[in-house]
Image (tube, grey):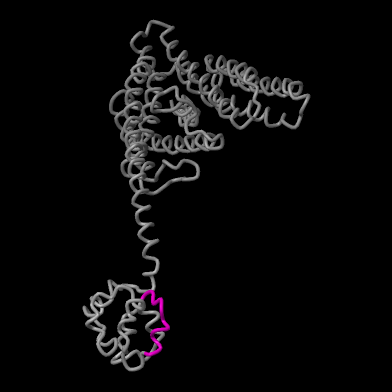
């Protein structure tokens, strides 16, 4: 209601429609029929005008309702047309305040959970990183010991096996009937091929292993699904995908350790692995902390709601910085003009690997692949960016060194 609409009521009520829209809740309008040039029957106003505290302004009619007079004459009329909802409005406000308290408590709980998750993440890294570092530099510390590479190979084999198990756990949630026994057999065969550096020394052996695995899968699944062939395609698909995704791509990390023993660059295998993990983990760390603290623009909210463009920039910057540190310290054979662009490319490729794994988890309705690593989820959550980058760095090293 605009109070200016009432200003035309000079010495009487000339236009009754203004009264209905201007004075809230006139219950007994029949008493107003005698109001011609003024209000003659003022005693009826108690039932006609709700709670008018300052009746002194109603002498010969409603005159001079403006400014403070109108506000003191008619209680707190800001938008008179909404006053009829006052009671329900107050109730709504109270409900909103109660819900706000609940939201605030939930936000506090979420914040505590984030802090606990961050602490768990740091503790896991503090425990796991020294073991990984020792496994990488052990051939440098024990150059005369051929078995020095064995620790890293054992760790890599266990990690890939756990990642494959977590992958099939996700597919099981979707009721996709993979064949884990055949998958582990194929993964083991590929692992052995990579231990002998098959991509470089015996590429035919690597191809033959993949071909034989495909034949075994198709034949075995033909008999496995003989009762219901409608599920055979999905069973074969997830079985083959799991092995190619985890064992085939991840096997290049094994080949990076087992190969490059005859390079003119001393301890090239250890240097490559050091550079590999430093860049991938640096990109992941930079993206995580920058995204958590400064992220505002979502990268792919439908795939991975936590990832932001600010996090991507943070990952690129930190990976480039770590690449420069690597070139300046333990890897001088890789100059800055090569190491920094390579690190940026690996950061972006790792991001796509992370998004691909996030899409798989989202399809299975899971936040993490597992909970084996506190604060990090499962091993597959740590392998996602490594898997995509392993063949890239391996073949780069083959062509560059």
Residue nearer the viewer, 368 or 155: 368
In magenta stretch: residue 41: no
Tell me residue 72's x, y (percent). 23, 76
**Residue occupying the far top of the picture:** 145
Tell me residue 289's x, y (percent). 33, 37
Name the image quarter holding residue 342.
top left
**Residue occupying the far bottom of the picture:** 37
Quadrant in which the N terminus is drawn: bottom left
**Residue occupying the far right of the picture:** 227
Residue nearer the viewer, 90 or 231: 90
In magenta stretch: residue 29: yes
Report whether residue 100 is seen. Answer: yes
Identify the residue at image location x=60%, y=27%: 172
Q: Is residue 108 left or right of residue 197?
A: left
| Magenta extent | 24-34
All told, the count of numbered labels is 0
């Amino acid at each position: 209601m605009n109070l200016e609409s009432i200003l035309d009521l000079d010495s009487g009520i000339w236009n009754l429609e203004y009264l209905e829209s201007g004075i809230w809740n006139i219950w007994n309008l029949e008493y107003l029929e005698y109001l011609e040039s003024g209000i003659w029957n003022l005693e009826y106003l108690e039932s006609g005008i709700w709670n008018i505290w300052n009746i002194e302004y109603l002498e010969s009619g409603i005159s001079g309702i403006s400014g403070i007079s109108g506000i003191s004459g008619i209680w707190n009329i800001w938008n008179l047309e909404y006053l009829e909802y006052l009671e329900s409005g107050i109730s709504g406000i109270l409900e909103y305040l109660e819900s706000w308290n609940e939201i605030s408590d939930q936000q506090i709980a979420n914040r505590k959970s984030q802090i606990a998750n961050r602490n768990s993440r740091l503790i896991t890294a503090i425990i796991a990183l020294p073991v990984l570092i020792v496994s990488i530099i052990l051939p440098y510390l024990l150059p005369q010991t051929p078995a020095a590479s064995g620790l890293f190979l054992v760790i890599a084999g266990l990690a890939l096996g756990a990642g494959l198990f977590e992958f099939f756990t996700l597919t099981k949630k979707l009721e996709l009937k993979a064949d884990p026994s055949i998958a582990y057999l194929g993964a083991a065969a590929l692992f052995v091929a990579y231990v002998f550096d098959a991509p470089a020394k015996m590429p035919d052996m690597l191809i033959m292993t993949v071909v034989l695995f495909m034949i075994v899968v198709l034949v075995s699944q033909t008999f496995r699904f003989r009762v219901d062939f409608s599920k055979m395609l999905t069973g074969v698909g997830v079985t083959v995908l799991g092995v190619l995704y985890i064992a085939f791509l991840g096997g290049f990390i094994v080949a990076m350790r087992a190969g490059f023993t005859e390079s003119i660059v001393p301890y090239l295998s250890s240097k490559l692995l050091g550079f590999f993990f430093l860049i991938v983990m640096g990109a992941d760390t930079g993206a995580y902390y920058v995204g958590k603290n400064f992220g505002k623009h979502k990268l792919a909210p439908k795939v991975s709601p936590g990832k932001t463009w600010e996090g991507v920039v943070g990952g690129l910057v930190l990976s480039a910085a770590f690449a420069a540190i690597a070139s300046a310290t333990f890897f001088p054979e890789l100059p800055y003009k090569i190491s920094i662009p390579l690190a940026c490319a690996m950061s972006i490729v790792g991001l796509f690997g992370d998004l691909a794994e996030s899409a798989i988890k989202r399809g299975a309705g899971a936040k993490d692949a597992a909970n084996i690593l506190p604060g990090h989820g499962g091993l597959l959550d740590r392998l996602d960016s490594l898997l995509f980058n392993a063949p890239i760095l391996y073949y780069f090293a083959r062509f560059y060194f």
